[in-house]
Amino acid sequence: MVHERQGIEYHARLKELFFVAVELDGEERRLFVKWACCEDRELRADLESLLRYHHHAVSADDRKAGEP
């Protein structure tokens, strides 16, 4: 799929997929990302990157919340 990664439509699609995927866990999330991105490797890579970043940010916040 050919698209402009910086385009408004691309970012809107990425945001839409992120908000769905972030609510899923494990295998369900993996299958959703695979289905939603189909053969679009760039979109899949960007979505997976956002999900990893979100996971690490949430984990860091959880660790900070546990600090005295």
Image (cartoon, rainbow, N blue to C red):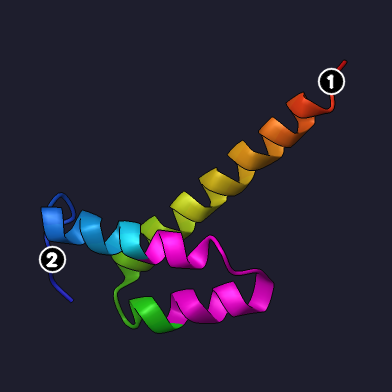
Above or below, comparing residue 54 to residue 10 in the picture: above
Q: Is mark 1 on a helix, strand or loop?
A: loop
Q: How crowded is mark 1: few (under 14 residues within 10 Å), some or many (20 or more)?
A: few
Residue 2 locus on image (x, y percent): 13, 71
Nearest the viewer among 42 and 29 is 29
Q: In this view, does 11 lie to the left or right of 52?
A: left
Above or below, comparing residue 48 to residue 50 in the picture: below
Could you tell me how far apart the alpha carbons at marks 2 and 1 are, in whole angstroms?
A: 44 Å
Mark 2: amino acid: His
Residue 43 locus on image (x, y percent): 31, 65
Label for residue 3?
Answer: 2
Q: Is residue 49 left or right of residue 29?
A: left
Dominant secondary structure of the residues highlighted in magenta in the image = helix
Q: In this view, does 15 lie to the left or right of 26?
A: left
Mark 1: amino acid: Glu
Find out whether residue 20 is within the magenta segment: yes
Q: Quarter of the image containing the N terminus?
A: bottom left
Which residue in the rendered view is the most extreme toward the top?
Answer: 68
Label for residue 18?
Answer: none
Q: Give the range drawn in magenta.
A: 17-34
Q: Quarter of the image containing the C terminus?
A: top right
Where does label 1 land, which residue? 67
Residue 51 locus on image (x, y percent): 51, 54
Tag 1 or tag 2, which sits nearer the N-term?
2
